[in-house]
Amino acid sequence: MQVPAPFDYVRATSVAEALQLLERHGEEARLIAGGHSLLPMMKLRLARPDWIIDINDLDELRHVTVDGGLLRVGALTRHADLLDSEEVGRLFPIVHDAERVIADPVVRNRGTIGGSLAQADPAEDLTTVCDVLRAEVVVAGPAGERTVPMAEFHRGPYETACGQNELLVEVRFPVRAGQGSAYEKVERRVGDWAVAAAGAAVVLADDGTIAEAAVGLTALGLEGLATDAAAALVGQRPGEEAFAAAGRLAAEASAPVEDGRGPVDYKRHLADELTRRVMRTAVARAGALTAVPGG
Amino acid sequence: MQVSMTVNGTEVSRDVEPRQLLVHFLRETLGLTGTHWGCDTSNCGTCVVLVDGVPVKSCTQLAAMTAGHEVRTVEGLADGGTLDPVQQGFMEEHGLQCGFCTPGMMLTARALLDRQPHPDETTIREAISGQICRCTGYATIVRSIQWAAAHPAAAPSDQEVRA
């Protein structure tokens, strides 16, 4: 039987109380939201906190709203909530692409966007999504709230800018007119971690060329965006030639490691192929958006 | 610590260790062994129960986290002597072989049909995609759920639940 080592449990009823509890119990306290990363790690003794602070009652952190050019998503918003939101799917189809392949439907009923980002597993999908959408996260701490761009929040595998005495409270996505986005993952079976995945967001110029592009990779050893691939796309007319160049550059930027999910060559091939696929889809979606006005 | 919740409509309160998982609270503390305990890693889905009507893997939730919430297990599916349409569907369409995944499958099916009374086959397959049937009897599980969708007030009055 796998059971966590003993700990004390306390339930927070507000963000302020959660922060006080973090302060009081110090280094050996952990927040629990969905718990689908933390509890398995505790069963394996990879994590052994003395205190568990349950934040599931913080309804103030469970919201999806569009406000002043920003989509604001509370950190405690479940994966299933994001999938249920038509507005999220319309504004950021990449979020629905990724959410559909995160774990499985039952796990998605519990797992949260804040938990995924704060856990920062290297094979976790939403970090790439937030990277290419240039999202910001709001972190609450003893000195108040601060806003951190995703590029600075994610510091590497299992490492973020969120301090021990801080709490991720919100994720903010800038709404861009005419933006198309997409995410695609290869996994061995439903619910498994990614063998590899890629995400892209593009904005097309009036003449149909690519005005802005962002490409990101998951589980492929690349921290942050594939900037060379994106640079090669900007100013180009969308098409197989441009996508192939981006795919090649993304594969070069990747640094996959061999494991049970595949050898390096295969993963590098996926970096190339998946980059082409998400670019195709993102451009098609951006085109569909720009084609709509006027009929 | 003292943990109180509603299980199958009955208020229960027990003194448990904070580290006790919901699956063990149900099986060992309450003796409700209909909820099965499988992989322990939130992969297999045999431990699925409904918390506030939503399917969750009870091996990956603390009993303490469930305090104040409503839990429904397979023991809470039948209404007195009347089977839930999902249970009857599993009988009619041979939805179980060894029976190990069955409680979790039936609860996910119940939650799906409560939310979406007439799901298509793709939706049903997606809904149970986080649960493993090691007998690989997926075709009949899907047909069982389709049967329940087609017979929302299924169980005839002479349908007895036999021990």
Image: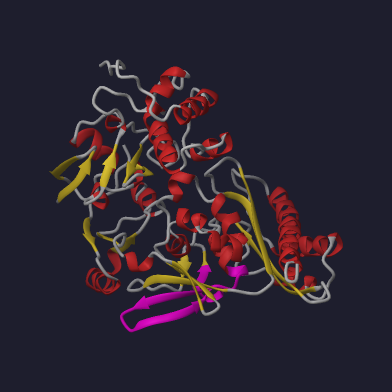
Q: Residue A268 location, x and y as percent?
A: 72, 54
Instruction: Classify the position of the N terminus of chain A by image quarter.
Output: top left
Left or right position of A24 against B129: left
Q: Is residue A280 depicted above or below A61 in this figure?
A: above
Q: Is residue A267 depicted above or below A61 in this figure?
A: above
Left or right position of A278 against B125: right
Q: Is residue A16 depicted above or below B45 in this figure?
A: below
Q: Residue A57 location, x and y as percent?
A: 29, 61
Q: Residue B109 location, x and y as percent?
A: 43, 35
Query: Viewer-proximal residue, A50 or B36?
Result: B36
Query: Viewer-proximal residue, A239 or A116?
Result: A239
Q: Is residue A153 depicted above or below A109 in this figure?
A: below
Left or right position of B118 against B163: right
Q: Quadrant of residue B105?
A: top left
Question: Within the magenta stretch, is there residue A144?
Answer: yes
- Residue shown at 55% from the left, 25% from the top: B139
Query: Viewer-proximal residue, A194 or A86?
Result: A86
Query: Viewer-proximal residue, A204 or A159?
Result: A204
Question: Within the magenta stretch, is there residue A243?
Answer: no
Instruction: Classify the position of the C terminus of chain A by image quarter.
Output: bottom right
Q: Range of the magenta residues?
A: A131-155
